[in-house]
Structure formats: C-alpha cells, structure tokens
Amino acid sequence: MHLCLLVNYWLIKSEPYKYSWQQFIDDKSTYWDGVRNYAARIHLRSMKVGDHCFFYHSNKGKEIVGIAEVTKEHYQDPTTDDDRWVAVDVKPIATLKKPVTLAEIKANPELQEMALVRISRLSVGPVSKAEYNEILKMSNG
C-alpha cells in the first residue's frame, strides 16, 4: 500500500464545453495538457503522485465541482514537440456535494489570498491546506 505523508493541493481549470467534470468522470482519468503559461508550468512540475487538485469549471459556471488526484508526475506534453511544456496524469476521486462558486470564494475572508482570487487567469495554481479545508467546508464536505 502506498502512503503519501505529504499531500499538496492544487487547482486545475477547464472550460466545461472543452472538458467538463462529467467527461472526466466518464473517462476515469486523463492527462492535463495544453498549459502554455510559465507559472502554471512550474506548478505542474511541482505536482507529486497523490496530490489533490480541485477541478474548476472556468468561464461558464466559474465553480469548483470536484477533486482529482495526481497519478503520474510531469512528463513531456504529448500535444507539442516543444520540450518546455509538460503534462501530468490525474483521476477523479470525488464530486463536491455542492459546487463552490467563484463569487462564494471571493466573499469568504479566509480565501482572499487564494491564487484563484489573486491570479485569476492562472490555469494551474497552488491551494494551501487551510484553503483546501475551507473549500471542503463550504461544499458541505
């Protein structure tokens, strides 16, 4: 049995019309590719097997809808020959009981420093343990 003593938390964004939470559940796993932002790339490279990621529907919905787990650490993004870009593999592990909207996150004083609030255009970002727990609480989880 694999025990991960140190889990880090992240947020990954997808526009639901391109790749929705439901499609992710149906697929049972996917690789997270197409990231072309240097800050987001740093976060992908920092992800470890067992880390948890909030799955956020961007543009339409603007809400955290589920939790994914990293199953394979960074490797060459298969959608490009440019070796500067990486992907990770993720699988869905839980649908939130209640999605947590961006408006709710912005209204919560505990979440004002969250990367999603401060650097809203970042497609992959860090989430602190306290932020992760607060989001779970807000989702009645």
Image (cartoon, helix red, strand yellow):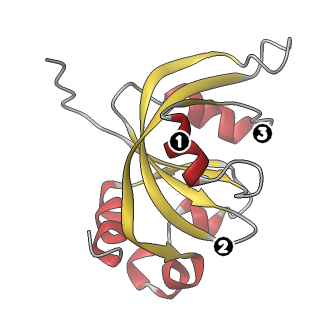
> Percent position (x, y) of residue 133?
28, 64
- Quarter of the image holding residue 96? bottom left
> Percent position (x, y) of residue 45?
57, 26
CA–CA distance between discs 1 and 3? 28 Å
Tag 3 residue: 37
| Relative height, residue 75 to residue 46 (above, below) | above
Tag 2 residue: 61
Q: Earlier in the sequence, mark 1 or mark 3?
A: 1
Amino acid under disc 3? Asn
Instruction: Work out which quarter of the rendered image holds the C terminus and state it.
Output: bottom left
CA–CA distance between discs 2 and 1? 19 Å
Left or right, 59 with respect to 44, comes to right
> Percent position (x, y) of residue 8?
36, 40
Q: Determine the secondary structure under disc 2.
A: loop
Q: Residue at x 38, y 78 (%)?
A: 110
Using the image, tell me which numbered label, if any, was put on residue 26.
1
Q: Determine the secondary structure under disc 1.
A: helix
Amino acid under disc 1? Asp
CA–CA distance between discs 2 and 3? 23 Å
* Closer mark to the observer between disc 2 and disc 3: 2
Q: Residue at x 45, y 57 (%)?
A: 66
Q: Residues within 10 Å of mark 1 (few under 14, many from 20)?
A: few
Q: Earlier in the sequence, mark 2 or mark 1?
A: 1
